[in-house]
Every structure is written in structure tokens, then in C-alpha cells.
Image: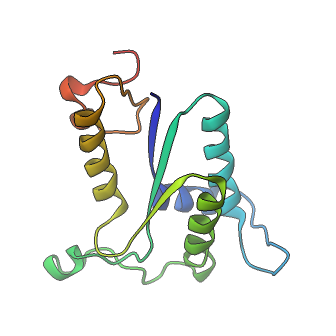
Amino acid sequence: MDVHLIDGTYELFRYFFAVPAAEDMNGREVGAVRGVLASVLSMIERGATHIGVATDHVVESFRNDLYPGYKTSEGVAPALLSQFPILEEALQAMGVVAWPMVYFEADDQEIGNCEALARADESATSPGGCPPSGFPSGRQAGS
């Protein structure tokens, strides 16, 4: 089992600033979405058997109540924020599990899934998609 758990928020931000802007036929900005989907498709083509993508559907989380000044969506380009629901819908259309997070953050979902997977399947490995602590003894691909 080759598992990839992806922080879709990180990837969406990364592609937003790395690739040229592009619009779909409805005039919506989708350049970053195209970049993330290309990466996911590449993982599938290289043999990934299980892929899940968690996104911060809303950037704010429970941590905003705990820590003054914690990250918010203030100052984030609307063209970037508008791509979150497009990415989530496109991933689901590809058959990829998407977790749009509202209360928790994408990172929280990834860690929880890594821990659950490690308990459920001893053969599971992650080529970097899970933190080493998510698998017993840091079990990663090839270990």
C-alpha cells in the first residue's frame, strides 16, 4: 500500500505563487488548482494506491480562539481563496478523497489519518506523506 496524505492548502498556496494564472471557461482563476491536480495525477501514474488531500476550507480554525494573532485569511488574495472549493470538487471528481476542514486544519487531519492507517495496516508505507511519528518506528517507504 503506497499512501500519500497531502496538505492541499500548502500545495494550493505553493502553486498559486509558482505557476502562471489561468482561467476556466467561466472566468474563474484555476492556475493553482491545475498545478495541484497535475501533482496528484503524477502520484497516481507513479503507483500511489491511496491518496487523501486535506484543505483548510476556511483558513481560520479553533486555534484563532486560543492564540491572538494566529493566521487568518486576511490579506490572502481572493483569487487564491476562491480556488479552495474548486480544488475540493475537482479532487472528488477524480476519485481522490478530499477533506475540506472547517474547525480543524489540514495538518490535523493528516496526522490523525496517519496514526489510524499505521494502526490498521502494518504493510502501509508513506513516501513522506506522513510525519515519521505517524508510523511506528517512523515506518516510511522502504523501511
Residue 55 is left or right of residue 14, and the answer is left
- Percent of width and height locating residue 90: 65, 63
Q: Quadrant of the N terminus?
A: top left
Q: Image height check: is 142 above or below 110? A: above
Q: For this rendering, which residue is in front, 105 or 75?
A: 105
Q: Quadrant of the C terminus?
A: top left
Residue at left 55%, top 33%?
A: 48
Q: For this rendering, which residue is in front, 123 or 26?
A: 123
- Percent of width and height locating residue 46: 63, 28
Q: Residue furthest front?
A: 120
Residue at left 33%, top 78%?
A: 60
Q: How is the image coloured?
A: rainbow
- Percent of width and height locating residue 136: 19, 27
Q: For this rendering, which residue is in front, 105 or 3?
A: 3
Q: Quadrant of residue 115?
A: top left
Q: Residue furthest left?
A: 66
Residue 128 is left or right of residue 115, and the answer is right
Q: For this rendering, which residue is in front, 114 or 15?
A: 114
- Percent of width and height locating residue 106: 37, 60
Q: Image height check: is 12 above or below 111? A: below
Residue at left 53%, top 34%?
A: 49
- Count the marks: how many? 0
Q: Residue furthest top?
A: 143
